[in-house]
Amino acid sequence: MRPELAPFERHGLSDGQLAAMLRTMLLQRTLESRGFQLNRQGKIPFASASEGHEAVQAGAAMAFRRGHDILVPYYRDLGLALGIGLTAYDVLLSLFARAADRSGGRQFPHHYAARALGLQTISSLIAAQTCHAVGAACAVKLRREAGRAVLTTFGDGATSEGEWHEAVNFAAVAKLPVVFLCENNEWAISTPLSKQMGQPDVYKRAAGYGIPGAVVDGFDPIACYAAVAEAMERARSGGGPTLLEAKCYRFLSHTTDDDDRTYRTREEVAERRKDDPVPKFERFLIARGILTQTDIEALKSSVLAETNEATDRAEAMPYPPPAAAFENLYEGPWEPWQ
Ligand SMILES: Cc1ncc(C[n+]2csc(CCOP(=O)(O)OP(=O)(O)O)c2C)c(N)n1
Ligand SMILES: [Mg+2]
């Protein structure tokens, strides 16, 4: 007989929500390797990597209230975007830069936007999004939009930028409804954490701004959900900003344009892979009797089928016509974030 497992704290998440988080994590991983494959086949110029960030993003997405909250993410947030409703087809249209992409094929790959989902367009400039998020939170407060909060994400490297400090400070002074979530993966391209900051904990800086700060295991989607849900609820109910830090790791190169073998050892990466959050969460859900191995195989087949179908459909779509390069620049009828 199997020994009884100690009960786990599910923070109100149903079995269906736990399974949905795993599906998002699996879809993220499948879509991401599709991006790398398409790049190596010469079909797309570029793709980002987010392996190692699946748990924090699936947890954060589950804490986001679609239709109410605003998400101001960064380029490594594929799983967060999927978790709040972006589709595999949207992602592939972005990678293939087709006319049907929401930006008309003109944004950088993995720089999504979807107004209906509350997903604000991504800025490539490190930390710039934290100021955009504070602006959005300021608008929410001035308009007295009750029950609405802004979630913004960034890497460890972004916390060295002046804009990051200005954003957190302004939000703290004005008590804005915003949550700052650092996805600390220990690297900023080739710069290790030890060359980025004098001590390794980003969340401790919260004290310097007079706001709550907390750290969470970024490989545990339930813990990440709980931390983000609590901070978002504080923001929605007038309690002001929070600085969260999720400790995770980047398993792949920075992007398809980078080769991490030039600056970190294979041993380091292999060691961190032992804690890979995706198989870890699969094992957890099986051990708790929430899913069976067969259920997980079915989920994997379904995300692969979805990715294959979206790849073929997006690839068959036309590029924007050359004249479209001049549309939506200076005048004419256009809406931001379309
Ligand atoms: C202002 C600015 N400086 C430099 C860059 C080049 N750059 C792109 S990603 C990156 C590393 C960012 O690292 P981190 O914030 O830890 O996020 P991660 O990519 O590790 O998730 C840098 C330096 C940039 N995009 N913008
Ligand atoms: Mg980093």
Image: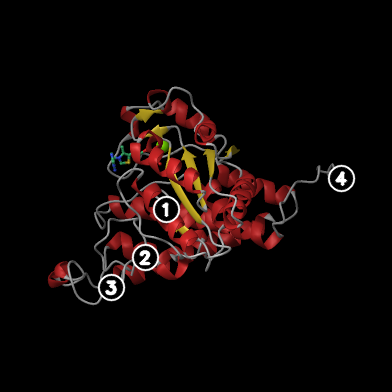
Would you name the residue on which mark 3 appears? 317
Of the residues tagged 1 and 4, which is closer to the observer? 1
> What's the residue type where badge 2 is placed?
Thr
Q: Residues within 10 Å of mark 3 (few under 14, many from 20)?
A: some
Instruction: Give the structural element (helix, strand or loop) at label 2.
Output: helix
Going from N to C along the chain, the mark reached first, 3 or 2, is 2
Q: Is residue 52 visible?
A: no
> Mark 1 or 4 closer to N-term?
4
Q: Relative to 130, say whether 332 is above or below.
A: below
Query: Which residue carries the number 2 mark?
Result: 311
Viewer-nearest of labels 2 and 1?
1
- Quarter of the picture containing the N terminus is top right
Tell me the amino acid under the disc marked 1.
Ala
Which residue in the protein does label 4 denote? Answer: 1
Regarding residue 171, the answer to whether it shows in the image is: yes
Q: Is residue 246 left or right of residue 46?
A: right
Disc with the residue nearer the chain's start (3 vs 1): 1
Which residue occupies the foreground of this view, 143 or 73? 143
> Exactly how many numbered labels are in the figure?
4
Which amino acid type is marked by label 3? Met
